[in-house]
Amino acid sequence: ILKMTPTHFHFIVAPDMTAEWETWAQIAVRLFASDYRIESAAGNTIHVRVNGSDLVRGLRSCHHARNTVFRLMKDDQHLPVLQFQITESGGASGRLVLVTHDVPIAVLRPAETAHLAEPAIPPASLYVLLPPLDVLKPIVDKLRLLSPVVTLTGNARGQLLLHARADAVQVQTHFTGLINPNLV
């Protein structure tokens, strides 16, 4: 679930029949958008159900863009989509190319999301920028084969430890030289 508010984007994995765990993450809009507007009858908050892989593909397509505009729209079949309009340089010619990427979504009514509540956790005292996803994901996937629980531990020296334990084995992976930004 993607929850959009005037100040933040919230990424929510809610427990259901297939997952017993819950994940919440939020990103301040000001960190990635220079011009952002949201309007809704539900207090300027919009919840959408989106396939995570589709969303990641849409976001990756923006990685080297000169400019990206994303908006909630309806496609040609009148189905809701999160549309990415990406302006890129067209190779050696230098001409600008407009690429459109539609990510299918389902807009959720407030009654469908009323049960969602962000878990109460203390404010973070430390931030660690994670390694690139293409480096981190294969490692986490292998650790998840050993154990359903993978522990991440970071410190103020830019170090990150990933840890998984099974009956007969314990595996740890270390990253060093990571950035500890001051986001507070």
Image: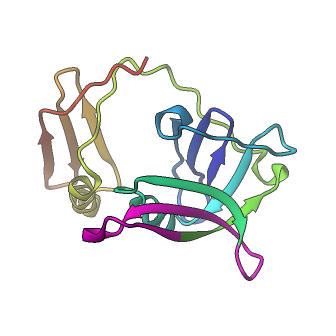
Depth check, front residue: 122 or 180: 180
Depth check, front residue: 17 or 102: 102
Residue 128 in the image, given as x and y percentages of width and height: 29, 30
- Tell whether 8 sits left or right of 66: right
Residue 139 in the image, given as x and y percentages of width and height: 21, 57
- Tell whether 182 sits left or right of 87: left
- Tell whether 102 sits left or right of 59: right
- Tell whether 161 sits left or right of 148: left
- Looking at the image, residue 31 lies above or below residue 90: above
Q: Is residue 86 magenta?
A: yes
Q: Which residues are magenta?
A: 75-100
> Residue at the location (65% across, 56% down)?
71
- In the picture as drawn, the residue positioned furthest to the right comes out as 41
Q: How is the image coloured?
A: rainbow
> Residue at the location (34% across, 19% down)?
182
- Looking at the image, residue 147 lies above or below residue 99: above
> Residue at the location (75% across, 49% down)?
113
- In the picture as drawn, the residue positioned furthest to the bottom comes out as 77
Residue 178 in the image, given as x and y percentages of width and height: 19, 33
Residue 32 in the image, given as x and y percentages of width and height: 47, 40
- Looking at the image, residue 4 lies above or below residue 136: above
Q: Is residue 54 magenta?
A: no
Depth check, front residue: 47 or 21: 47
Quadrant where the C terminus lies? top left
Quadrant where the N terminus lies? bottom right
Question: Tag count in the figure?
Answer: 0
Q: Quadrant of residue 16?
A: bottom right
- Looking at the image, residue 55 lies above or below residue 166: below
